[in-house]
Image (cartoon, rainbow, N blue to C red):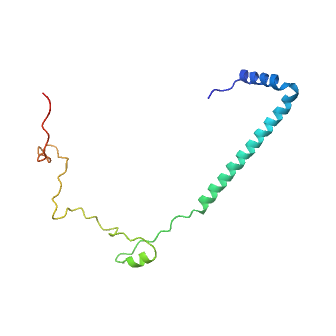
């Protein structure tokens, strides 16, 4: 955005003096000053209102309640949790996920191979013949 220097301000004032005349120019300047004051007052009012609203919401927002950890050997009643409107996970949170492949499905070989391993895990896949001369 171009900046307005003293020469540009002088040209604008000269044009305003020629257009509005010496009698109306002071009245016009007062009106422009009053409009700018009103605009600044509205801006300050909106800014302070937004600041108050943001402060009220942040003060009113309480952290989510947390439950203490279960004692070792304690059990949880899933039906009681569902009746209270809670969600019960399918598997216990502390239980490790079952990563073993089912017995009826063979394990898929990893596409990465260790250094010095010449075996190609995808050698049995059909590859198209090379095209060209």
Is 54 above or below relative to 2?
below
Residue placed farthest to the right in the image? Answer: 23
Left or right, 62 with respect to 111, comes to: right
Q: Is residue 54 above or below residue 103?
A: above
Q: Is residue 77 above or below residue 29?
A: below
Q: Position of residue 92 (x, y in %)?
A: 33, 70
Q: Nearer the viewer, residue 21 or 68?
A: 21
Question: For residue 96, which quarter of the picture?
Answer: bottom left
Q: Image quadrant for the C terminus?
A: top left
Q: Nearer the viewer, residue 11 or 93?
A: 11
Residue 82: x percent and y percent? 42, 75
Q: Position of residue 57 (x, y in %)?
A: 61, 59
For residue 53, above or below residue 20:
below
Residue 88 picture location, percent across and down: 38, 71
> Which residue is located at x 74 percent, y 42 percent?
39
Number of callouts = 0
Q: Residue at x 69, y 49 (%)?
A: 46
Asked whether 19 or 11 is in front, the reply is 19
Res 52 quadrant in image: bottom right
Relative to residue 126, is residue 22 drawn left or right?
Answer: right
Residue for point 61% across, 29% down: 1
User: Residue at (30%, 68%) from the top-left corner?
Assistant: 95
């Amino acid at each position: 955005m171009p900046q307005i220097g003293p020469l540009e301000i002088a040209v604008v004032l000269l044009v305003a003096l020629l257009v509005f005349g010496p009698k109306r120019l002071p009245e016009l300047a007062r009106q422009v000053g009053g409009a700018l004051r009103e605009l600044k007052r509205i801006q300050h009012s909106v800014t302070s209102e937004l600041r108050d609203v943001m402060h009220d919401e942040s003060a009113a927002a309480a952290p989510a309640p947390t439950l203490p950890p279960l004692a070792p050997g304690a059990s949880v009643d899933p039906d009681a949790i569902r009746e209270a409107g809670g969600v019960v996970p399918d598997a216990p949170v502390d239980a490790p996920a079952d990563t073993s492949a089912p017995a009826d499905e063979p394990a898929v070989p990893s596409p990465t191979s260790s250094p010095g391993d010449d075996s190609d895990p995808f050698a049995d896949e059909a590859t198209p013949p090379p095209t060209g001369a």
